[in-house]
Image (cartoon, rainbow, N blue to C red):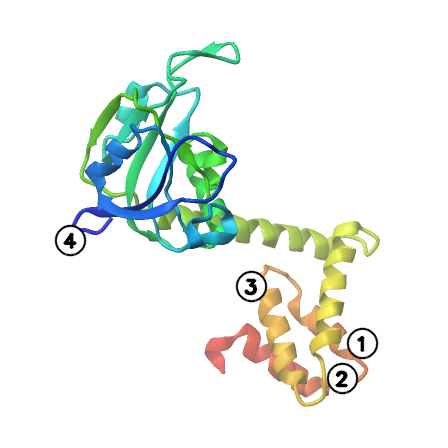
Amino acid sequence: MSEQDGKVRISYKAGLNEKDPTGFKEYRVPFDKVAEMVRTAGQYSAASFRDEYRDAKHVLPGVELMILDYDDGLTVADALALFSRYIGFIATTKSHRKEKNGVVCDRFRVIIPTKSPITLGTEDYSAMMKEVIINHYGPDRLCCNIARMYYGYPGAEVFSLDGCRLFDWEPFYQSAQDYDRQRRQQQHRRSAKQPSGDRAAVEFNRYIENFMRKNFVPGARNGMLFRLARWLRDEGIDDVARVVTEQNSLSGCPLPDDEVNEVLRKALNPLKT
């Protein structure tokens, strides 16, 4: 949300025909206006779309609203307390306090403007939202979809959040990146230590072999081995020198040992170069 004018981006389409993905027009409106838009017989999305066509491939960068959808497990009162620090509002949905799949409970959405526009691609947005959902706020996991559409409801009750913060999505994205990096490092450590017949180790070795075949050519051998060593180091592989030396010897046009050692020194001890 712009601190200068208090406006946010939102896309909106009148009518409730969910099978038609066209006609989602982008608006930039004062945040107070969003509460009015969710109380109409229309469809809205936090994302904006190229050519007004709602799908992930047409999403334009710069999402400015965090929309979290709750179908069970949290009451409106719980949500008012949980999100009390934020500027925003809670709007009940059409199925609020009605029987749905044998369950009667509070059903609502929490809508909060973001501190800065979310400029992530589809996959990174989903990873960030999984961190928000799984490890923190626990709404419907379908909220991970950057092109997610929500129905407006004229009978919605709207409850204001009276905090002073905007939603800062960047720490959640950083946390998701850290988790993914740690997971990949653990996978590669396990792969490097497992027997060659193990499926994970075979896939890891195949990746390196393909990398060598495509990139290890006369005139570019030093730079390629340097990139390989840095990648292995960043992925948490314990015995980088052994892997690089082995791949060099298998290449068909290996570098001399002293050049390989110099590449490893620069890649693994960058501050000493």
Give the amino acid at mark 1: Leu
Q: Are marks 4 and 3 in contact (CB under 8 Å)?
A: no
Q: Residue at x 74, y 78 (%)?
A: 248
Residue at image mark 3: 234
Marker disc for residue 250: 1
Give the amino acid at mark 4: Gln
Q: Secondary structure at mark 4?
A: loop
Give the amino acid at mark 3: Asp
Residue at image mark 4: 4
Q: From the image, state whether disc 4 or disc 3 is nearer to you.
A: 4
Marker disc for residue 89: none
* For residue 159, above or below residue 255: above
Residue at image mark 2: 254
Q: Secondary structure at mark 2?
A: loop
Q: Secondary structure at mark 3?
A: helix
Q: Are marks 2 and 1 in contact (CB under 8 Å)?
A: yes
**Residue 198's spot in the image, x, y percent?**
80, 50
Q: Residue at x 40, y 44 (%)?
A: 24
Mark 4 or mark 3: whose residue is earlier in sequence: 4
Mark 4 or mark 1: whose residue is earlier in sequence: 4
